[in-house]
Image (cartoon, helix red, strand yellow):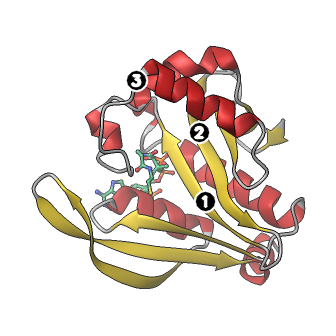
Amino acid sequence: MIEGKRTMLRALERTDIARMHQWMNDTEITTYLLVTYPISLDQETSWYERQQSDDRNKVFGIVERGTNRHIGNVGLHDIDWVARKAEAGIVIGEKDCWGTGLGTDAMQTLLSFAFGTLNLNRVYLTVFAYNERAIRSYEKCGFSREGVLRRHHYGNGAYHDAMVMGILREEHDTQMR
Ligand SMILES: CC(C)(COP(=O)(O)OP(=O)(O)OC[C@H]1O[C@@H](n2cnc3c(N)ncnc32)[C@H](O)[C@@H]1OP(=O)(O)O)[C@@H](O)C(=O)NCCC(=O)NCCS
């Protein structure tokens, strides 16, 4: 377990697949993600199985402390062990938890693990510009806005900008002091 203040990050289990499959077919959630097509249970299972032996992608289940409820996933992708950087991703799939601070806590927990345990130097992510809640959450974690990718995403009948955000280890360490 990776311990946060209000959440804990744990390994994903096969018994989580059905729950994650539901999240990945909920368009209220996937409108914020790079998910275009409906996802079959077989596809979700294959994704889960690939995660088990993948050293470049590490995805954890977010568990709410106290209730032990699996409310979402957070992870590091494309881990580059030479440049010591990785791309972060997060989804809170249990929508009643949106806006409760749990996503920010889980991302802060992931960052402490990325810098303090994995010894990474940079964590970055891409977020759709219309996802103001996520942008605010990432800023609370210490991410800076690094640039705008113009009309990078197409969804709901329109092109949308995306934003690259990043945080360096030294910025994270300063923030923790
Ligand atoms: C993005 C996500 C991880 C954030 O986690 P969360 O627990 O909902 O976020 P928090 O409650 O910690 O923080 C949200 C902040 O955004 C603010 N916010 C909410 N809606 C907002 C809006 N429309 N505009 C601006 N700020 C907004 C909240 O007030 C809060 O800020 P505050 O603490 O200063 O008041 C979560 O909402 C989620 O998984 N959403 C669906 C999937 C997703 O968007 N994933 C990210 C893809 S890049």
Separation of residues labelled 3 and 2 (CA atoms)? 18 Å
Cβ at disc 1 under 8 Å from ligand 1 = no
Dot 2: within a 10 Å radius of its alpha carbon, few (fewer than 14), some, or many (20 or more) residues?
Answer: many
Numbered mark located on residue 73 in the image: 2
Separation of residues labelled 2 and 1 (CA atoms)? 11 Å
Image point 78% across, 70% down: which residue? Answer: 176
Q: Position of residue 107 (x, y in %)?
A: 63, 54
The residue identified by callout 1 is 88
Give the residue type that dot 3 points to.
Ser
Relative height, residue 161 to residue 106 (above, below): below
In this view of the protein, can residue 37 be seen by the observer?
yes
Q: Position of residue 24 (x, y in %)?
A: 41, 32
Res 70 quadrant in image: top right
Numbered mark located on residue 40 in the image: 3
Marks 3 and 2: which is nearer the front?
3
Give whichever of discs 3 and 1 has the lower sequence position: 3
Dot 1: within a 10 Å radius of its alpha carbon, few (fewer than 14), some, or many (20 or more) residues?
Answer: many
Image point 48% across, 28% down: which residue? Answer: 43
Relative height, residue 131 to residue 74 (above, below): below
Dot 3: within a 10 Å radius of its alpha carbon, few (fewer than 14), some, or many (20 or more) residues?
Answer: few
Give whichever of discs 3 and 2 has the lower sequence position: 3
Relative height, residue 45 to residue 126 (above, below): above
Give whichever of discs 2 and 1 has the lower sequence position: 2
Res 60 quadrant in image: top right
Numbered mark located on residue 122 in the image: none
Give the residue type that dot 2 points to.
Asn
